[in-house]
Amino acid sequence: MNHDRFRRLVLRALADIPEPFATHLRGVAVVVRREPNAADRVEAGLEGDDELFGLYTGTPLTERHDYQMALPDRIVIFQGPHEREFSHAALSRQIRLTVMHEVAHHFGIDDARLEALGLE
């Protein structure tokens, strides 16, 4: 898939996030990259050949007490792993799920809860 088309699907998923949640994403940088690098994989705690579809870095809203002079939170969505793992027909839905998964981390929802919600 064309990189611009993939990026537009990510932006569409973000645009569909309703208020008041969308307000809390204004300071979050959302980036689309082709592939995760070694540091991304380490940060995500991945081992072996597991694919990394997205990554949230930052301080979740539930853990912020005195949040000043910090780098902006960031969500990275990786195009290559999505294209390798999902059919073209399923890609749009999976991108949306990945975006929601990473946004949920920003709101302090951990992987165990995301799995229970069907977003893992």
Image (cartoon, grey):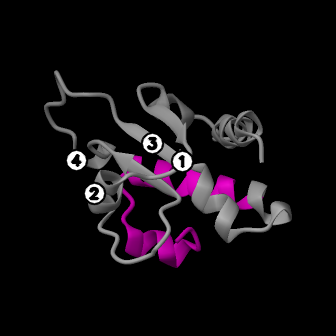
Instruction: Tell me residue 24's x, y (percent).
Output: 45, 33
Mark identifier at residue 63: 4
Residues under labels 1 and 3: Cα distance? 7 Å
Q: Earlier in the sequence, mark 3 or mark 2?
A: 2
Marks 2 and 4 close (CB-CB < 8 Å): no
* Quadrant of residue 44 within the rendered picture: bottom left
Q: Residues within 10 Å of mark 3 (few under 14, many from 20)?
A: many
Residues under labels 3 and 4: Cα distance? 17 Å
**Left or right: where 103 falls relative to 2:** left
Residues under labels 1 and 4: Cα distance? 23 Å
Residues under labels 3 and 2: Cα distance? 13 Å
Marks 1 and 2 close (CB-CB < 8 Å): no
Q: Residues within 10 Å of mark 2 (few under 14, many from 20)?
A: few
The answer to whether residue 20 of the structure is visible from this angle is no
User: Is residue 115 one of those drawn in magenta?
Assistant: yes
Q: Earlier in the sequence, mark 1 or mark 4?
A: 4
Q: Earlier in the sequence, mark 2 or mark 4?
A: 2
Residues under labels 2 and 4: Cα distance? 18 Å
The amino acid sitting under disc 4 is Glu
Marks 3 and 4 close (CB-CB < 8 Å): no
- Residue wearing tag 1: 77
The amino acid sitting under disc 2 is Glu
- Residue wearing tag 2: 43
SS at mark 2 in the image: helix
Mark 3 or 2, closer to the camera: 2
**Left or right: where 4 falls relative to 112:** right
What span is colored magenta in the figure?
A: 93-120
User: Is residue 13 one of those drawn in magenta?
Assistant: no
- Residue wearing tag 3: 75
Q: Earlier in the sequence, mark 1 or mark 2?
A: 2
